[in-house]
Image: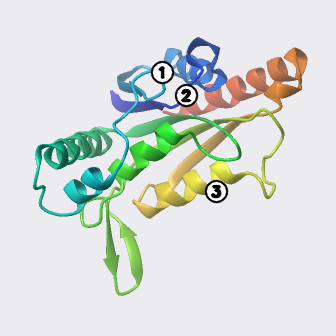
Amino acid sequence: MKNVLVLKSSILAANSQSNVLVDYFKSKISANITEHDFGENPLPYYDLDAATGTRGEPQNEAQKAALALSNQLIGEVKDADVLVFATPMYNLGIPAQLKTYIDYLNRAGVTFQYTANGPEGLITGKKAIVVLTHGGIYKDGPADLAKVYMQTVLNFIGITDVEFVYAEGIGYGPEVAAKAIEAAKVELDRIASSL
């Protein structure tokens, strides 16, 4: 049985379309699931203590706590076969809660390393599924920034098998939103059947 790590980041709780879609996906698979909802339980802000603690030798309790948290989150990724991200777009970017998670995850010498040929990801052999929900229509256009960011940051740490599932136009009214959700569910069914 596969280990699946689910990472939600919407601040909209039960009204979140990205959470609804990821919950739907979970219902279609048989797996050991570890889940974080960073909208409901945000991580501590990645600040000077967090950066110091995760990049060197922690000197105080806040820095030690940040290193322990980073180690825990990285351990979960290493244990997972599949990562599933519920990723709404806020103001053309990913939620701050998800960005904080990525800041704790990306550590030189741990999840990536610099080489003579450039950065090399150290987290390999994983699959990522990124469920993108947009109020407007942005897929494959210049404002498809959440996809570009997630693709880049996951590739950077070595996760190159990444599938994107879109639900777009949610802000255009109930009929468009319903069609977008149904289309996304079809894609999630396809992915679930291949796991």
Name the secondary structure under disc 1: loop
Judging depth in this view, the residue of 157 and 80 nearest the camera is 157
Q: 100 above or below 115?
A: above
Residue 119 in the image: x percent, y percent? 40, 74
Q: Which residue is mark 2?
A: 192
Q: 124 above or below 195?
A: below
Q: Which residue is mark 3?
A: 148
Name the secondary structure under disc 3: helix
Choose the circle earlier in sequence order: 3 or 1: 1
Choose the circle earlier in sequence order: 2 or 1: 1
Choose the circle earlier in sequence order: 2 or 3: 3
Comparing labels 3 and 1, the label whose residue is closer to the camera: 3
Residue 121 in the image: x percent, y percent? 37, 64
Name the secondary structure under disc 2: helix
Q: Is residue 42 left or right of residue 181?
A: left
Q: Which residue is mark 1?
A: 29
**Which residue sits at x=54%, y=60%?**
152
Q: Quadrant of residue 111?
A: bottom left
Q: Is residue 168 left or right of residue 97?
A: right
Residue 83 in the image: x percent, y percent? 44, 38
Quarter containing the N terminus: top left
Instruction: Measure the C-alpha gap from mark 3 to mark 1.
Output: 27 Å
Q: Amino acid at mark 1?
A: Ile
**Which residue sits at x=13%, y=55%?**
58
Q: Amino acid at mark 2?
A: Ala
**Which residue sits at x=23%, y=62%?**
55
